[in-house]
Image: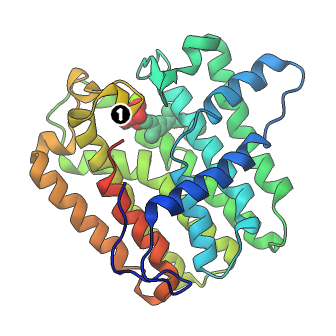
Amino acid sequence: MVATNNLKTPQGQASFEISAYLQARQRLCDVALEGAIPIVYPEKIYEAMRYSLLAGGKRLRPILCLATCEMAGGTIEMAMPTACALEMIHTMSLIHDDLPAMDNDDYRRGQLTNHKVYGENIAILAGDGLLAHAFEFVATNTQNVPAERLVQVIAQLAKAVGAAGLVGGQVLDLDSEGKPDISLETLNFIHIHKTAALLEASVVSGGILAGVKDSDRQRLSRYAQNIGLAFQIIDDILDITATQEELGKTAGKDQKAQKATYPSLWGLEESRRQAQQLVEAAVAELTPFGEGSIPLAAIANFIISRTH
Ligand code: FPP
Ligand code: MG
């Protein structure tokens, strides 16, 4: 992992250690998620939901939400229920993405996929359960936030998962299998919807909870869309260059499914250059937020230096 050199932390220390920051935030999120879904009757479904939710992801979406809320003057406590909901939504999308009717994958987050352990029927229901629980969790657990902000957050999350977000992106992604010659516009459309939309909801909802003004909200959207595309470019690169052990999921899938990817369109080197440019554009959007934006800037840089 990387340390972002020559930066001052919000507390004015000499450097900002992104790796320590991410680890500490990941632990906070893991503790909150651990308590978010108790096991009750019928136990099987709660166990299946917890199996994938607590499998130890990077927690990037919740961390982005918490970091943005803090940067905009809010607190971790205000944002934690939304942060947990984002991870529930992300996890449900992965459970469904791995199903035989979609990508038919056996491994995720270093363990067998949900349907491999619980069967397809329970895996579908575990995804549905997590999606519904995400919205209930935000609505019933958020404290010290005005109701109108909460309604906006819920609308943001719903838009990001629906046909105007993840679902729409996934539809075109499925259509693009076996078509290695799709256009850059179609590839961008897929990833803006399938990947960037939930990252955007993570960042913007953190801002909304803290009460950012409209112009700052738009800056946050642009920051997130840029890091979202950069994230996907790196994902495509890692699918080629990393191992199954590093990724915790099957490697080399894009080529096998004959999918167009950024490296297949541009090559590896140009893909890295484009990702770097997107991160620079993202960080430029943070200028008005001053020193408080150091964590978000460091997260943007982490996204392109990650190895899994
Ligand atoms: C992984 O992409 C999959 C996603 C980022 C989201 C997929 C979206 C759905 C299945 C829709 C879910 C439904 C709702 C209601 C949100 P990938 O297959 O490119 O990456 P991978 O290698 O990690 O599988
Ligand atoms: Mg997949």
Of 215 and 282, the residue lying toward us: 282
* Colour setting: rainbow
Q: Quadrant of the C terminus?
A: top left
- For ligand 2, which image quadrant applies? top left
Determine if residue 62 is in view: no
Q: Residue at x 74, y 39 (%)?
A: 132
Q: Residue furthest front?
A: 14
Dividing the picture into quadrants, the one containing residue 276 is bottom left
Residue 136 relative to residue 267: left or right: right
Q: Secondary structure at mark 1?
A: helix
Dividing the picture into quadrants, the one containing residue 107 is top left
Q: Residue at x 47, y 88 (%)?
A: 290
Determine if residue 144 is in view: yes
Of 18 and 87, the residue lying toward us: 18
Residue 58 picture location, percent across and down: 51, 46
- The relative height of residue 284 versus residue 248 in the rendered view (above or below) is below
- Identify residue type, mark 1: Glu
Q: Residue furthest right?
A: 41
Q: Residue at x 28, y 25 (%)?
A: 253
Residue 160 picture location, percent across and down: 55, 52
- The relative height of residue 212 versus residue 24 in the rendered view (above or below) is below
How packed mark 1 is, by other alpha carbons closer than 10 Å (few <14, some 14-19, many 20 or more), is some
Q: Where does label 1 land, which residue?
A: 246
Q: Residue at x 42, y 48 (%)?
A: 195
Residue 202 picture location, percent across and down: 56, 59
Residue 270 relative to residue 162: left or right: left
Dividing the picture into quadrants, the one containing residue 11 is bottom right
Residue 51 picture location, percent across and down: 66, 26
